[in-house]
Image: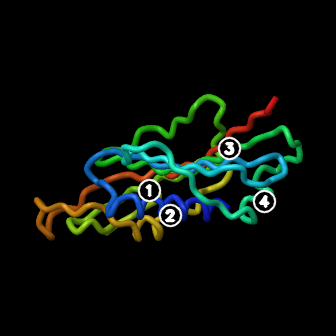
Amino acid sequence: MIKLALLALAAASATSSPALMSSAPWWEKVTITIAGDGNPQSCRYESSRRAQSAQSCEVDSGAATGAGGHSASDLLTRITFERRFSPGAAPASGALEPGDKLIGQQVLALAIDSRGAVSGCKVVATSGEMTPEYGCDDASAERFEASAKRSAAAEPKRGYMTVLVYGHEEHVV
C-alpha cells in the first residue's frame, strides 16, 4: 500500500504541473482514511503548489486491506504519504502535527542539472519503523523546472526531498 500511495503521489504531482519547482520549497501529500475493518473510506491529495483546495483521489481497496490492523468498527486511521522539497540548504525538520505518529521518513539529497533532471541523489537520513519505498530511483525519474539562466556546464542546483509516512488514529463516537 505504501508504494502504491507514494506512486499515486508522484502521479498526482505529474498531472498537476509539468515540472516540479527547484527554486522554492513545496510539499504535497496523499491522506488515506481507513476504517477499523481495513477498508479505505477516503483519499485526499493536497499540494502547496496548487491554488485550489484538496482533491479526492483513488486507492485500491485490496492494497489498503490490513493497513489499519484493527477490527474495531469505531476506529478510523489516517495514513499520510508526504513529500517536502527544500532547495539549497538542509531541509526543515520532518515535524508532525500533535497526535500524528511517524511510520517512516527518508531524506534524499538531490542534484538538479540545468535541464531539470536529477543528476545525483543520495539518501542522507532515515528514521521510523519502516523506510518509505520512494527512493533515489523514483526521485531520478522526476522532472524539475529547467533553469534558463544557467549553462549546461553550471554546477547543479542542490535540494532535499523529505519523504514522510505517518499515521493518526481516532475513535469515532
Q: Circle 4 sits on which residue?
A: 65
Residue 31 image offset from top left, x and y in percent: 60, 48
Which of marks 2 and 4 precedes in the sequence?
4
Q: CA distance from mark 2 to mark 1?
A: 7 Å
Toward which corner of the image does residue 96 lie, by quadrant?
top right
Which of marks 3 and 1 precedes in the sequence?
3
Residue 32 image offset from top left, x and y in percent: 65, 50
Which of marks 1 and 2 precedes in the sequence?
1
Instruction: Give the crowd class for mark 3: few <14, some 14-19, many >=20 residues within 10 Å.
Output: many
Q: CA distance from mark 1 to mark 4?
A: 29 Å
Q: Which one is in front, 23 or 155? A: 23
Q: CA distance from mark 3 to mark 4?
A: 13 Å
Element type at mark 4:
loop
Q: Nearer the viewer, mark 3 or mark 2?
A: 3
What is the three-letter code of the residue carrying label 3? Arg
Whether pointer 2 and pointer 1 mark residues with C-beta atoms closer than 8 Å, the reply is yes
Tell me the tag on residue 46.
none
Whether pointer 3 and pointer 2 mark residues with C-beta atoms closer than 8 Å, the reply is no
Q: Circle 3 sits on which residue?
A: 78
Q: Circle 2 sits on which residue?
A: 135
Q: How many marks?
A: 4
Whether pointer 4 and pointer 2 mark residues with C-beta atoms closer than 8 Å, the reply is no
Element type at mark 3:
strand
Which of marks 2 and 3 precedes in the sequence?
3
What is the three-letter code of the residue carrying label 1? Leu
